[in-house]
Image (cartoon, helix red, strand yellow):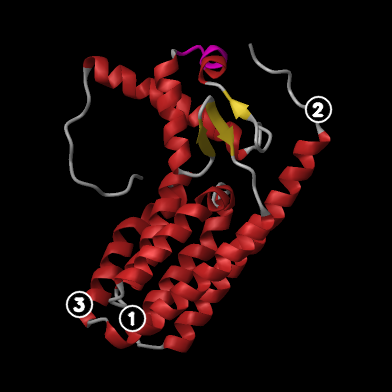
Amino acid sequence: MSIPSEAAPPPSGEFAESGSLVEHAYQALRARAIDFAFRPGETVRVLALSKQLGLSRTPVKEALNRLVTEGLFEAAPHGFVARSPDVDEIVDLCELRSVLETAGFRLACARADDAGIAALADWWSTVSPGYADLSVSETTRVDEAFHERFVAMAGNREMIRQLRLVCARLRFFRTIDLDRPDFRVPYYDDHLAIIDALRRRDAEAGTAVIGRHIAISRERAVEMIKEALARIFARKPAAPAR
């Protein structure tokens, strides 16, 4: 299932072929990054990767640029750098996210109108039937959009702006967390509970769910990052590609 969006004419000819090559490179490199095939801080070069994937440099570079927006790589003067996971960063950002979302929910309970709450529930009902089958990037976007929507009902533009910045920095860690479909079920249930609490204007119930929701995400991300780092530094670094 894909996220509902405005209809667009299907690509054709050269553009369709180019798009499929980018998607192929994107999926291949994304899978490697999530599995920590690249050592933290490792510089990856477009030419070397294009040879490995049997593609030209253009789709590989476009794919890496997409992965930069997801936080899996960082752009560098002479290529791209594999993101270095930082456990302290996860904890700090999750704490900040929890503060913003719980404060936003309390304000939304006081300020949101019934039509806005109904619109959130209707939107969630359109994406939730196929939630478990979404790709990891789609799941991440849907989850972020859900939280942004109820915080936006607080009517504080600065709050939503800060939340978007925090979520962007957490995307790398949350991508790893959501890569397992069985991890998504609690999120689905929590979203329903948050909508229910908002309908009832029950700030205490809603903030309790949000706090637990973020804490579970943080704990799983920290655990997986530690395990991944142990694997990474236990293996010998790959010989540099030429």
Task: Tell me the CA gap for discs 3 and 2.
Answer: 57 Å
Q: Main secondary structure of the magenta part?
A: helix
The amino acid pointed to by label 3 is Ala
Residue drawn at the location 43% of the way across and 80% of the way down: 103
Mark sitting earlier along the chain (3/2) = 3
- What element does badge 2 sit on? loop
Q: Nearer the viewer, residue 152 or 15?
A: 152
Closer to viewer: mark 3 or mark 1 = 1
- Residue 176 placement (x, y as % from top left): 58, 48
- Residue 3 placement (x, y as % from top left): 32, 48
Q: Nearer the viewer, residue 241 or 30?
A: 241
Residue pointed to by mark 1: 108
Task: Tell me the CA gap for discs 3 and 1.
Answer: 13 Å
Residue drawn at the location 67% of the way across and 59% of the way down: 88
Query: CB of mark 3 within 8 Å of CB of mark 2?
Result: no
Q: Which mark is residue 83?
A: none
Q: Which residues are magenta?
A: 50-55
**Quadrant of the frame with the N terminus:** top left
- What element does badge 3 sit on? helix
- What element does badge 1 sit on? helix
Task: Tell me the CA gap for discs 1 and 2.
Answer: 51 Å
